[in-house]
Amino acid sequence: MPRRTLKSPWIVSIAASLMLASPVYAGLVNDVPSCYVATHIAPSDKPYDNLLYVLIDQTVKLDPTLKQSVVDNMMRLLVPGSKFVVAEFSAFSQGHYLNVLHTGIIEKPLDSSRVSNTSIQAAKQLEQCLNMQKTYALNMALSTATQVLKTDTSSLDQSGHYVGFEDSFTRCLAGFR
């Protein structure tokens, strides 16, 4: 029987990439405890409607107004039914270009169609838990983003982009001499 070989090398590279990347699940771990699990109520089929990525570039120094805008928008957008990912990235962080700091889901309240099938006590416990969960998640996301925003830098001399620019600029100057 003849041996089959893959004729497309890109299929092999995609398969290898997926196998190598499989242990990394950036943004898949929920750092916010589930109220549905805590109250033993089956969660919704679709736990969130909104997805918010807050990716903060450490190579750019943001002015205070822009930093406050990030916080204000997070407060406005992080509502029940939202999943969030707070991460930092940098072009010069020595091989750690993206660091996911926190991921969480602020769960939606119990759907009105399910309220009549849930005990009054369980529904009250869920409602109380969801209020605490929202506060917990907001504090986690906002404090993480605020901490990252405090550590930004404008030291472009650490950046590979600056080195490339400096080298190109030096060559251009040499061409004019």
Image (cartoon, rainbow, N blue to C red):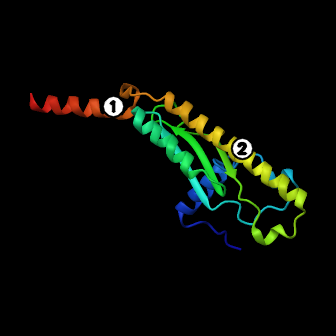
Residue name at image x 56 percent, y 41 percent: 87
Say which quadrant the C terminus sits in: top left
- Which of the two labelled residues, at mark 2 and mark 1, occupies the earlier sequence position? 2
Question: Which residue is drawn at the image coordinates 43% and 27% (left, top)?
Answer: 153
Q: Which residue is mark 1?
A: 162
Image x and y of residue 173, in percent: 15, 29
Task: Report whether 43 appears left or right of 20.
Answer: right
Q: Is residue 148 visible?
A: yes
Query: x and y percent of residue 128 in the render?
Result: 79, 49
Question: Would residue 67 be found to the left or right of residue 22 on screen?
Answer: left
- 59 or 67, which is in the foreground? 67
Q: Secondary structure at mark 2?
A: loop
Q: Amino acid at mark 2?
A: Asp
Q: Residue 151: x percent and y percent?
A: 50, 27
Foreground residue, 60 or 137? 137
Residue 166 position by quadrant? top left
Q: Is residue 34 visible?
A: no
Residue found 40% across the figure and 31% down from its top: 159
> Is residue 78 placed above or below 60 in the rendered structure?
below
Q: Which mark is residue 31?
A: 2
